[in-house]
Amino acid sequence: MPGVMTKKVAVIGGDGIGPEVVAEGVKVLEALREIRGWDLELLPFELGAERYLDDGTTFPADVAETIEKECDAVLLGALGDPRVPDMKHARDILFGLRFGLDLYCNVRPIVCLHDRLMPLKRYSAHDCDFTVFRENTEGIYVGMGGHFKKGTADEIAIQEDVNSRKGVERIIRAAFEFAKAHGKKTVHMADKHNAMKHAHELWHRCFLEVAEEYPEIEAKHVYVDALCLFLVLDPSQFEVIVTCNLFGDIVTDLGAALQGGMGMAASGNVHPGKVSMFEPVHGSAPPLTGKNVANPLATVLTVGMMLSHLGYEGEEKILTELVRQAVHTGHCTAEVGGDLGTRETGDWIVSRLREMVG
Ligand code: IPM
Ligand code: MN
């Protein structure tokens, strides 16, 4: 019988295709709420380029406070608009959530759900199933630095790569904990300590130390450039990869290509046990906006991750299975080989959901 759940989820559609894909995620959540009898409140926030251009608001303190004090999770669409070339609003909102809520684990599952989506000719879908733990609160993303003699021929720009023992240790530990909980045999840590002899020496040393606490899991170091090579040559060797903020950003786009494109890539920005944020990895895709062509499946997978974070792991499995079926039966958008629109894909997922669990 349905469990009782009192949860509040903040919903930020954002820019471009963000609101379109989030609408499909919300449809799925509303259907589950009805079927399961959940006490689940969705709290929409109008934030994004439109609001910024209208009244200068990016990420107001009262919204941040409401999210932190009253919500259990945030569902975010995408941010970015050609009318805001410096991405100010996007950084304020995205980094406001990531840093403000101390969401140190950017968890990005790289799972290919159908052979058709696998771009490597020697491999099939089952060869690509790993999870990247991207550090999400440090590195070059903290924005420490500045310009000197800006705009002159002698201009200098500096941006510091910030790595704390605490920050490095907690993401590495999260990767090992995930591996342990999911029966994975290896954790790869990707750094660049051959060149970054201070910051990434810390990563390497910390990795070896934390690994000792998990003797049942094989700890493997790989330089990040070599990781890119191995991901293309043989993705099947990876189960869990942990890396810094910038490398994680880059490697997960490569990963998205292995799973069928950005429209299939889900993510959670997580602080275990605390309010966390969930977003599809793709951007706002301005050229696709308003055409009902954006792939909502990354958002459906992302909603699954969010439900798992809220304690509903079974529902994550169901949503992943439905996305797999959507791709297998062609009930998906053209980008992943189907002929449905964004809304119709969401409708199909909801109707199958009702057949399966309703
Ligand atoms: C991502 C995005 C962001 C990042 C951008 C929009 C700042 O690429 O979530 O992967 O670099 O983290
Ligand atoms: Mn990225």
Image (cartoon, grey):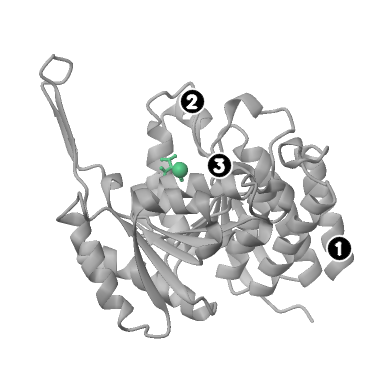
The CA distance from mark 2 to mark 1 is: 40 Å
Rendered residue at 58%/49% (across/down): 258
Image quadrant assignment for residue 187: bottom left
| Residue at the spot 25% in from the left edge and 63% down from the top edge | 203
2 vs 1, front mark = 1
- Residue 75 percent coordinates (x, y): 57, 53
Q: Which amino acid does label 2 sit on?
A: Asp
Q: Which residue lies furthest to the front in this view?
A: 122
Left or right: 167 in relation to 89: left
Residue 113's quadrant in the figure?
Answer: bottom right
Helix, strand or loop at disc 1? helix
Question: Foreground mark, 1 or 3?
Answer: 3
Is residue 356 toward the left or the right of residue 324 in the image?
Answer: right
Q: Is residue 260 above or below residue 133?
A: above
Q: Does the residue labelled 3 lie within 8 Å of ligand 1?
A: no
In the image, taking residue 58 as reference, residue 5 lies left or right, namely right
Query: Please, is residue 179 above or below residue 331 in the view?
Result: below
> What amino acid is found at the position of numbered circle 3 in the picture?
His
**How many residues crowd around disc 2 within 10 Å: few (fewer than 14), some, or many (20 or more)?**
few
| Amino acid at circle 1 | Arg
Ligand 1 sits in which quadrant? top left
Q: Where is mark 2, residue-wise? A: 54
Q: Name the residue under label 1.
A: 354
For marks 2 and 3, give the one nearer the viewer. Answer: 3
Q: Circle 3 sits in a helix, a strand or a loop, which is it?
A: loop
Tell me the residue that label 3 is attached to.
Answer: 282
Which numbered disc, 1 or 3, marks the residue that appears first in the sequence?
3
Mark-to-mark CA distance, 2 and 3:
25 Å
Contact? badges 2 and 1 (CB < 8 Å) = no
